[in-house]
Image: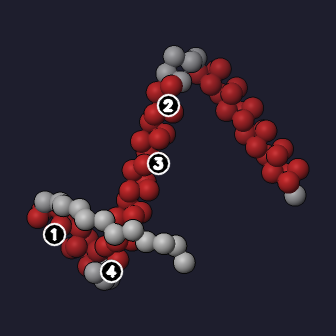
Amino acid sequence: MTALTRWTVSVSKDTDISVRSFLAQRGMKKGDLSKFIEEAVKWRVLDETIEEVRSKFDDLPADELETLIDEAVTAARRDRVAAG
């Protein structure tokens, strides 16, 4: 089982009502709020990370970026096949 950490967060009353209504409409219970928040945070971190990485390649021509991506995908597939 994954160790849990307790957070104390504050949100506006409107946000609280919106999220709880959203969860209730989908048959989710009060305990599902933590799961919902954790998933939302993970998506937000991923989104921010992607934006940060994209910004580092802004000055790279599209064809060069495509070549780099193709090479990385090929190497990852080769490594995966080699690992068995």
| Kind of residue at disc 2 | Arg
Q: Residues within 10 Å of mark 3 (few under 14, many from 20)?
A: few
Residue 80 appears left or right of 59: right
Q: Secondary structure at mark 3?
A: helix
| Kind of residue at disc 3 | Leu
On the image, numbered disc 4 is attached to which residue? 31
Residue 22 appears left or right of 69: left
Q: Secondary structure at mark 1?
A: helix
In percent of width and height, residue 72 lies at: 72, 35
| Kind of residue at disc 4 | Gly
Distance from disc 3 to disc 4, alpha carbons, whole Å, reads 24 Å
The label on residue 54 is 2
Q: Residues within 10 Å of mark 1 (few under 14, many from 20)?
A: few
Distance from disc 1 to disc 2, alpha carbons, whole Å, reads 35 Å
In percent of width and height, residue 52 lies at: 46, 34
| Residue 29 picture quarter | bottom left
| Sequence order check, earlier mark of 1 and 2 | 1
| Sequence order check, earlier mark of 3 and 4 | 4
Q: Nearer the viewer, mark 4 or mark 2?
A: 4
The label on residue 46 is 3
Distance from disc 4 to disc 2, alpha carbons, whole Å, reads 36 Å
| Residue 18 picture quarter | bottom left
| Kind of residue at disc 1 | Ile
Q: Nearer the viewer, residue 50 or 4?
A: 4
Where the N terminus falls, by quadrant? bottom right
Residue 55 appears left or right of 67: left
In percent of width and height, residue 46 lies at: 47, 48
| Sequence order check, earlier mark of 3 and 1 | 1
Q: Secondary structure at mark 2?
A: helix
On the image, numbered disc 1 is attached to which residue? 17
